[in-house]
Amino acid sequence: MSTTPGPAAPSLSLRRSTAALARDDGKLGWAPIVAALAIDLADLVSAGPHGLVIGGVLTTIVALANGVRLRRALGLGVLGAVYLALPLTEPIPLATMLTLIHGFLLRMRSNNSTQPSSPA
């Protein structure tokens, strides 16, 4: 009796991300959106060298609060520092937009995987 392997289980980090963004009822969770808004608001009030420090610290804290491993949180902190230090990013809420797009794509994928396939 041979068993065919099913689809590979998602990695732990993907499951954490999915759990943070989508609640059990399939609706988008608020924690990541609020975190992204905080990063975008910090971008609005900081510029230059201050943005490096504020962006790095804030992004690392937000990542750690959402259950990200320390190494990945530090990497995200570097990206957050660069994002807040870049000129002309203040009027564009990029962190919020990317979080919403990511949540939408996760919901689309979960909806596609839970729908029964119709016989041909």
Image (spheres, rainbow, N blue to C red):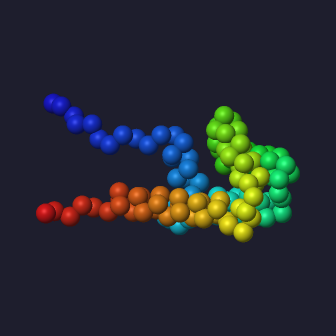
Q: Position of residue 39 (x, y in %)?
A: 74, 58
**Where 83 sits versus 111, above or below?**
above
Give 119 or 95, whichever is nearer the viewer: 95
**Where 28 sits versus 7, above or below?**
below
Q: Position of residue 67 (x, y in %)?
A: 65, 44
Quarter containing the N terminus = top left
Asked if residue 64 can be seen in this view, the reply is: no
Asked if residue 74 can be seen in this view, the reply is: yes
Q: Position of residue 28 (x, y in %)?
A: 56, 65
**Where 55 sits versus 29, above or below?**
above
Q: Going by the image, does 18 lie left or right of 2?
A: right
Quarter containing the C terminus = bottom left
**Where 90 sits versus 60, above or below?**
below
Q: Residue furthest bottom?
A: 91
Q: Position of residue 8 (x, y in %)?
A: 36, 40
Q: Please tell me which residue is depicted at 71% across the width and 53% down the height of the picture.
A: 83
Q: Residue furthest top?
A: 1
Q: Please tell me which residue is depicted at 83% across the width and 58% down the height of the picture.
A: 46
Q: Classify residue 31 by image quadrant.
A: bottom right
Give 19 or 68, whichever is nearer the viewer: 68
Q: Please tell me which residue is depicted at 58% across the width and 60% down the height of the picture.
A: 98
Q: Classify residue 38 by image quadrant.
A: bottom right
Q: Please tell me which residue is depicted at 66% across the width and 34% down the height of the picture.
A: 71
